[in-house]
Image: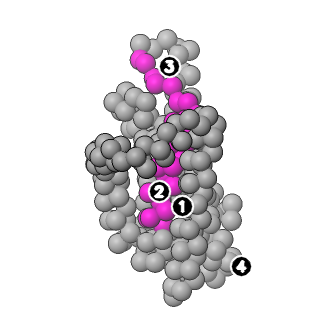
Amino acid sequence: MFSLILKDILISKKILLLTAAFLIVWMPTFRNFAAVVIMVGMAYMGLIVTSSADETNKADILLNSLPLRRHEIVLAKYLSIFVYSAIGIAIYLLVAAATKVLGFPIYVYPINFKAVIYGILAVSFLNAIYLPLMFKFGHGFSGIMYIILIFGFSYGISYVIRLFEKLVNYDWFQNIVSFIMNQSDTVKMLFITALALIILTVSCLLSVKFYKNREF
C-alpha cells in the first residue's frame, strides 16, 4: 500500500513543487488561513494529477492484475491526501525558516497547530466527497466535480457565516455553541479530529464499495 503512495508522489512531484511555490508566493493574501489553503491546494493538485495519469495509462487494469486487494488501493488514495498536505506544510516551514535566517524583508505567517487541524478538517471534507465519485465514475466526471467543490467551498464560507448569524437567535443553538466554547482547546481539537475521521471513514467505506463493483 505504501508503494502505491510512493508511486503517486513520484508521478506528481513536479506539479506538487510548483503548486507549493505558487501558494507560498500568495500566502500573505491568505494570512491566518495559510495552512488550510496550502493543505487543500496540495491535496487537490496531487489527486488530480495522479488520477488523470492513472486513467490515461489504464493503471487500474494493471493494479488489479497485481496481488493487491481493492480496499488497499482505495486506502492508499485516502492516505495520500494527508501526505500531500504534509509535504506542503513542510515546504512552507522550510521557506519560513530560510526567510528568517537570510533576513528577507518578507513576513511569513506562522502556522500553528490549530490551523493544521482546521486544514485537516477541510481536506477531509472535500476529499470525502470527491474520492467516492472518483472510484464510482473515474477521473473525468469527478475531476469536474472536484473543481466545483473547491470553488463551492470558497464561496460557501460566506453562506455558512450568514447561516450562523441566523442560528444564533435560537436558544438550542446558543446552548450548543456555549457548550463547545466552554471546552478547552484540546477538547475542541479532539472533537474536530474525530469529526474528520468519521467523515473519512464513511467516505472510505463508500469508495471501497464502489470500486469493488467496477469492472476494468
Tell me the CA gap for discs 2 and 3: 32 Å
Residue 37: percent from the left, percent from the top?
Answer: 42, 41
Q: Is residue 162 visible?
A: yes
Q: Within the magenta stretch, is there residue 164?
A: no
Which color mode does the image show?
one colour
**Relative to 199, is 45 on the left or the right?**
left
Q: Which residue is mark 4?
A: 67
Considering only order in the chain, which callout, 2 or 4, is on the residue closer to the N terminus?
4
Tell me the CA gap for discs 1 and 4: 29 Å
Considering only order in the chain, which callout, 2 or 1, is on the residue closer to the N terminus?
2
Q: At 49% from the left edge and 46% from the top edge, which residue is drawn?
A: 176
Dot 2: few (<14), some (14–19), or many (≥20) neighbours within 10 Å?
some
Q: Which residue is mark 3?
A: 99
Check if mark 1's residue and mark 2's residue have beta carbons within 8 Å: yes
* Amino acid type, mark 1: Ile
Q: At 41% from the left edge and 13% from the top edge, which residue is drawn?
A: 105
Res. 199 mark: 1
Q: Which residue is mark 2?
A: 125
Q: Nearer the viewer, residue 45 or 155?
A: 155
**Relative to 85, is 143 on the left or the right?**
left
Considering only order in the chain, which callout, 3 or 2, is on the residue closer to the N terminus?
3
Q: Nearer the viewer, residue 167 or 108?
A: 167
Q: Within the magenta stretch, is there residue 125?
A: yes
The secondary structure type at the circle numbered 3 is helix
